[in-house]
C-alpha cells in the first residue's frame, strides 16, 4: 500500500470518529477516482485589506535592503530616514504649507475642468447643433497635448496661479467631456422607446432616463480626470513655482536631498489615493442600485 | 360597439422586404386578442406600429388607437436606477400618482416592494412591476409583446392567471403578441394567426373545444406538418 493510500485511510478513520453516530454520511476522500480534475474558474475569496499586501512587501524589501546595506542611502534613503524627514517637514510647517498649496491648486483646476467638461458635454451630447458647434473643436484640442500649450498660456496668463490652474483644468475637462458625451449618446434605444410609449416630456426624459443613465459614464470620466489633474499638477509645479510639493521636490533635487524628494512623492501618492477614494465613495453614493460597482 | 382599435391597409417593409402586406384589424373595447405567428411573421411589427414606436420603418396604412395606451415589452424594461414605485409612476402626474402606484403594485401582489431596486427582483416580479406600470395608466388598450416569453413555465402560468384577473378588473382591450398556442387559447377571446405579413385566420375562442382549437392553430402555424415530416 502506498503512503498516500495509508494517509487516506487514516483521514477516513478520523472523519468517522469526528462525526456523531446519528449523522452518518458518505465522506469522499482524496481525488475522485475516475473523473478528471475539474478547474475552478472563480478567483479565490477576497480578503479585507488584501490590496495592502503587495505594498507592504515592497516596503519590507526596501527596509531590509537599507538595513543590510544593499541600497546606497544617496540613491534611496532608508524608509525610516524618509519618515523622519517627513515628520521634520511636517513639524516645521513647510510640508503643510506646500501640501495645502498643491491640494488647492489641484482642487481648483479639477473643479473648473469638471464644470467646463460637464457643460460642454451636455450641450454637445444633447443636441445636434451643439455637437456640430463644439465637438469638432474639442477633438482638435484633444489632438494637441495640453502640456504643449504651456508656453502659450504663460504668454497669456503669466507664470502665476491662473496659468497653473488653467493647465490643470484643460487636462481635466477632456476625459470628463469624452466619457459624458459618449454616455449621453449611448442611451439604450429600448429606454427611448419606453419614454415614447409612456409619453414622457423631454424634461422628464432627461431627468428620469438620460442623466441617470449617463451618470456612470460621468463617474468614470471623473476618475480619469483626477489622474489627469495629478499629471498636470506635477508638471506645472516644476514650472516657476515658489510653493507646492513640486517646488519642494525641485529644491531638494538641487541640494541632493533624496529623502525630501521621496517624502514629496509620498505626499503626491497620499493626495492621489485620497482623491481616488473620494471618487469611489461618490460613485457608491450616486449609484446605489449598482451593488457591485467597480468601474 | 365602436372598435377601440382600427387598422386598415397596414404595410411595413424593412430594407425593401415587405413584412406586413396590408393588415386590417379591429379590436372592440375590452376585447382580448392574441396575435399568433412564427418568428419573423411580422407580429411584433404590428404591435410596434400600434404603439407608434416604428418611425424609422418604411410603410403606409391607417392606424387608429385610443389615447390611453400602455405597452408591456418582453423584457420588463424597468429603469435600473429607479426604485420600483418610481418605475411604476414614471411620467405620471396629478399629485395622487404615488398612491395610485401603490395600489397598482398591490394588485400585482408586490405590496411592500415599493422601495426595492429592480435588480433585486426576480424575472417574474420585474414583469409584474411592468404590468403595474401599464395598468396604473388605466389603458383603453394594452399592447403586450411576448411579455412572458422569458419566464419559466410555472411563473408563466401564474402570470396568465394574474393577467386574466387584471383584465376582468380593468377591462382594457388587449393585443397580446405570442408564439405560444396554449397561452393564446388560455387568455384570448379571439386568436389571429399571422403568416408572411398577412392574417390567415381569425378565430373566436368562445364555444370552441380547447383541444380542437389547439390542433387547428398548430396546423395553421405549420407545426404539425413539420413534426410529422421530421418523424
Image: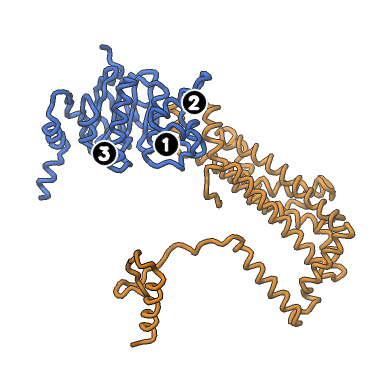
| Residue A61 image position (x, y, % from top left) | 68, 75
Query: Badge 2 sits on which subunit?
Result: B
Task: Specify whether residue B55 is in view.
Answer: yes
In contact (CB < 8 Å): disc 1 and disc 3: no
Q: Is residue A17 above or below residue B118?
A: below
Q: Quadrant of residue B166?
A: top left
Q: Is residue B68 above or below residue A153?
A: above
Instruction: Using the image, tell me which numbered label, if any, was put on residue B177.
Output: none
Task: Specify whether residue B8 is in view.
Answer: no
Residue positioned most to the right: A92
Q: Nearer the viewer, mark 3 or mark 2?
A: 2
Query: Badge 3 sits on which subunit?
Result: B
Q: Quadrant of residue A71?
A: bottom right
Mark 1 vs 3, N-terminal side: 3
Mark 2 vs 1, N-terminal side: 1
- The residue positioned 26% from the left and 17% from the top of the image is B28
Q: CA distance from mark 2 to mark 1?
A: 15 Å
B230 vs A216, left or right, is left
Residue marked by disc 1? B77
A222 vs B131, left or right, is right
Residue marked by disc 2? B91
- The residue positioned 22% from the left and 24% from the top of the image is B189
Residue positioned most to the front: A21
| Residue A86 image position (x, y, % from top left) | 82, 64
| Residue B142 image position (x, y, % from top left) | 34, 25
Task: Look at the numbered disc 2 and give the secondary structure of its residue.
Answer: loop
The one of B133 and A11 positioned closer to us in this rendering: A11
Quick one: which chain is orange? A
In contact (CB < 8 Å): disc 2 and disc 1: no
Instruction: Using the image, tell me which numbered label, if any, was put on residue B40.
Output: 3
Q: CA distance from mark 1 to mark 3?
A: 22 Å
Amino acid at each position: 500500500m502506498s503512503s498516500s493510500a495509508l494517509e487516506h485511510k487514516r483521514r477516513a478513520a478520523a472523519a468517522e470518529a469526528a462525526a456523531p453516530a446519528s449523522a452518518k454520511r458518505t465522506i469522499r476522500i482524496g481525488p475522485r477516482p475516475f473523473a478528471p480534475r475539474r478547474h475552478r474558474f472563480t478567483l479565490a475569496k477576497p480578503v479585507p485589506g488584501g490590496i495592502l499586501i503587495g505594498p507592504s512587501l515592497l516596503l519590507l524589501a526596501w527596509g531590509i535592503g537599507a538595513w543590510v546595506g544593499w541600497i546606497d542611502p544617496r540613491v534611496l534613503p532608508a524608509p525610516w530616514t524618509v519618515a523622519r524627514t517627513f515628520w521634520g517637514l511636517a513639524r516645521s510647517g513647510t510640508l503643510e504649507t506646500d501640501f495645502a498649496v498643491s491640494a488647492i491648486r489641484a482642487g481648483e483646476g479639477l473643479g473648473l475642468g469638471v464644470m467646463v467638461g460637464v457643460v460642454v458635454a451636455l450641450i454637445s451630447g444633447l443636441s445636434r447643433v451643439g455637437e456640430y458647434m463644439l465637438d469638432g473643436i474639442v477633438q482638435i484640442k484633444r489632438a494637441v497635448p495640453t502640456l504643449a500649450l504651456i508656453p502659450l498660456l504663460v504668454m497669456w496668463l503669466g507664470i502665476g496661479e491662473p496659468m497653473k490652474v488653467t493647465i490643470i483644468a484643460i487636462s481635466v475637462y477632456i476625459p470628463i467631456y469624452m466619457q459624458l458625451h459618449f454616455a449621453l449618446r449611448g442611451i439604450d434605444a429600448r429606454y427611448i422607446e419606453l419614454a415614447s410609449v409612456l409619453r414622457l416630456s423631454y424634461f422628464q426624459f432627461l431627468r428620469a432616463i438620460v442623466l441617470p443613465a449617463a451618470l456612470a459614464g460621468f463617474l468614470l470620466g471623473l476618475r480619469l480626470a483626477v489622474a489627469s489633474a495629478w499629471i498636470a499638477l506635477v508638471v506645472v509645479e516644476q514650472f516657476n513655482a515658489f510653493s507646492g510639493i513640486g517646488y519642494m521636490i525641485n529644491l531638494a533635487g538641487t541640494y541632493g536631498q533624496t529623502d525630501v524628494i521621496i517624502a514629496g512623492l509620498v505626499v503626491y501618492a497620499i493626495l492621489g489615493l485620497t482623491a481616488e477614494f473620494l471618487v469611489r465613495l461618490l460613485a457608491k453614493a450616486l449609484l446605489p442600485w449598482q451593488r457591485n460597482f467597480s468601474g | 360597439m365602436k372598435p377601440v382599435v382600427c387598422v386598415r391597409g397596414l404595410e411595413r417593409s424593412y430594407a425593401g422586404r415587405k413584412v406586413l402586406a396590408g393588415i386590417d384589424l379591429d379590436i372592440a373595447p375590452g376585447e382580448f386578442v392574441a396575435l399568433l405567428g412564427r418568428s419573423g411573421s411580422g407580429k411584433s411589427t404590428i404591435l410596434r406600429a400600434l404603439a407608434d414606436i416604428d418611425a424609422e420603418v418604411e410603410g403606409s396604412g391607417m392606424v387608429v388607437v385610443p389615447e390611453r395606451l400602455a405597452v408591456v415589452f418582453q423584457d420588463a424594461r424597468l429603469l435600473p436606477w429607479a426604485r420600483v414605485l418610481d418605475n411604476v409612476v414614471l411620467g405620471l402626474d396629478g399629485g395622487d400618482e404615488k398612491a395610485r402606484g401603490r395600489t397598482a403594485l398591490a394588485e400585482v401582489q408586490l405590496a411592500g416592494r415599493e422601495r426595492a431596486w429592480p435588480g433585486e427582483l426576480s424575472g417574474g416580479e420585474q414583469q409584474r412591476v411592468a404590468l403595474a406600470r401599464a395598468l396604473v395608466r388605466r389603458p383603453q388598450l394594452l399592447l403586450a409583446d411576448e411579455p412572458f416569453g422569458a419566464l419559466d413555465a410555472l411563473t408563466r402560468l401564474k402570470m396568465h392567471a394574474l393577467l386574466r384577473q387584471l383584465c376582468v378588473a380593468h377591462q382594457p382591450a388587449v393585443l397580446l403578441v405570442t408564439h405560444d398556442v396554449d397561452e393564446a387559447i388560455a387568455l384570448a377571446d379571439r386568436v389571429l394567426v399571422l403568416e408572411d405579413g398577412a392574417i390567415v385566420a381569425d378565430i373566436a375562442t368562445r364555444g370552441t373545444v380547447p383541444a380542437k382549437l389547439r390542433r387547428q392553430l398548430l396546423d395553421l402555424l405549420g407545426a404539425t406538418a413539420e413534426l410529422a415530416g421530421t418523424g
